[in-house]
Image: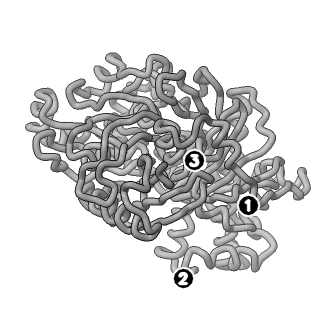
Amino acid sequence: MSRYVAAIDQGTSSSRCLLFDRGGAVAGAAQREHAQIHPRAGWVEHDPLEIVANVRAVIDEAVAAAGASAADVAAVGITNQRETTVLWERASGAPVANAIVWQDVRTAALVDELAAGDLDRLRAIAGLPLSTYFSGPKARWLIDADPALRARAEAGELCFGTIDAWLLWQLTGGAIHATDVTNASRTLLMDLRTLEWSVEALDLIGIPRALLPEIRSSSEVYGEVRCGCALDGVPLAGVLGDQQAALFGQACFDPGDAKNTYGTGCFLLVNTGAEPVASRELLATVAYKLGDGPAAYALEGSIAVAGAGVRWLRDQLGIIGSADEVEALAASVPDTGDAYVVPAFSGLFAPRWRADARGAIVGITAFTTKAHIARAMLEATAWQTREVLDAVRGAAGIACEQLKVDGGMTVDELLMQFQADVLGIPTIRPEVSETTALGAAYAAGLATGVWSSTDDVRANWREAARWQPRMDRDDVERRYARWREAVERSLGWAG
């Protein structure tokens, strides 16, 4: 039997490949960053060809790091930045433009036009509000950018996909044009209950059906790798959007199980069971679907800026030299001195959905130092998470008893303790921090018999650290009210 399952984790800032053994331990890994392209204010792009080249490179490097070969790998799973949108030629496989990244807000005017005063026009179908966040309007923008592209799209000469579909196409040598239900549920184009493309949504947004990939489950054999890399011949057998993959890797299989991933953005997902739960503040989304089994659903609160705020402190303000310096700087003061940072760099996502918001630093005085600003930036992530969890409790009537956490920011003990304090529930970090990649590996391994059921996944999950709430509740609520006041001051800035 093969010793490993590989996971390709294609994220907002980098591409990685990790090999996991049956116990969920990492046997080999490699990572490469790619360029962040900002042609205009509010626009964010990636080069799709750079991403493919990096993915092929990290596959080879991770296999070599594990001292393995294709024969040692039972399956490959893909997890990806979800709403980032690619359009490419069916005949050549060449992209027609750079990928439009999930953070990009160029579709704001189009979204307003489609909404006609009602951002919830498709929520009953797709579980989502009309927003610049999702990939359907991005695809519409791309085919409208050049008059020739719409005709080619309608003729079936072009392919649309989120990054998972782009990688499936490229890694299989153009044999597969498909996506999984979790990524499809982030397009605004899929019916959340039938798990099929919605004619009503396609007509409203203006997307030709010929452009779209086939929707498949999260755990099944899609095809084989055929791209001239070290994993050629290995089955591609699992696909999950990054946040759903983290939910899966955290073994959140029961209604009420919740996880929060602290990466470029911050994403809290709560398993809601076999039915989607309606919410005007949160996103109803598919959590996963295993083979021919029923779909499981989740409520999600998406926060645009978390780790990106720390990078802003480093790259734009220069108050830290590296991201790992932020905790020590923030811990050098006992609190923020009543200063608050609202990192609405390109609007606010859940639970407010305000594209007109912009970043604000509120409450600064002559006493305020760079340490207070650093601490306020960290605390902003915790306060935004509190707003999302409050919305989950209101929408689903689910009393989450604990929050499983993962992502790069969870090494920050100060943030994790503050997160437990403001939520009033334990914050728990697992032994294996690579939960997003691990979730994709589990999906692929379940499809190929490496693991027999989700019970095997539960058995692999182990706790590494736990933070209990300890802050005075009256103090928490007072400061939470101040945070909400600060957010109000960020609204309406971008007309």
The spot of residue 40 in percent (x, y) is: 30, 59
Give percent across and percent down for residue 429.
71, 56
Q: Earlier in the sequence, mark 3 or mark 2?
A: 3
Viewed as shown, does residue 33 lie left or right of 474?
A: left
Which one is in front, 390 or 436?
Answer: 436
The amino acid sitting under disc 1 is Met
Q: Residue at x 75, y 75 (%)?
A: 331
Q: Which residue is mark 2?
A: 321
- Which labelled disc corresponds to residue 360? none
For the point 55% across and 44% down, the residue is 302
Mark 2 nearby-residue class (10 Å; few <14, some 14–19, many ≥20): few
Asked if residue 349 is positioned above or below residue 125 in the image, the reply reads: below
**Taking 61 as reference, is 268 left or right?**
right
User: What residue is shown at x 20% (from left), y 26% (from top)?
Assistant: 210
Q: Which residue is mark 3?
A: 246
Q: Earlier in the sequence, mark 2 or mark 1?
A: 2
Q: Is residue 365 left or right of residue 162?
A: right
Earlier in the chain: of badge 3 and badge 1, it is 3
Residue carrying label 1: 416
Q: Depth-wise, is mark 2 or mark 1 nearer the camera?
A: 1
Amino acid residing under circle 3: Ala
Q: Quadrant of residue 24?
A: bottom right
Q: CA distance from mark 3 to mark 2?
A: 29 Å
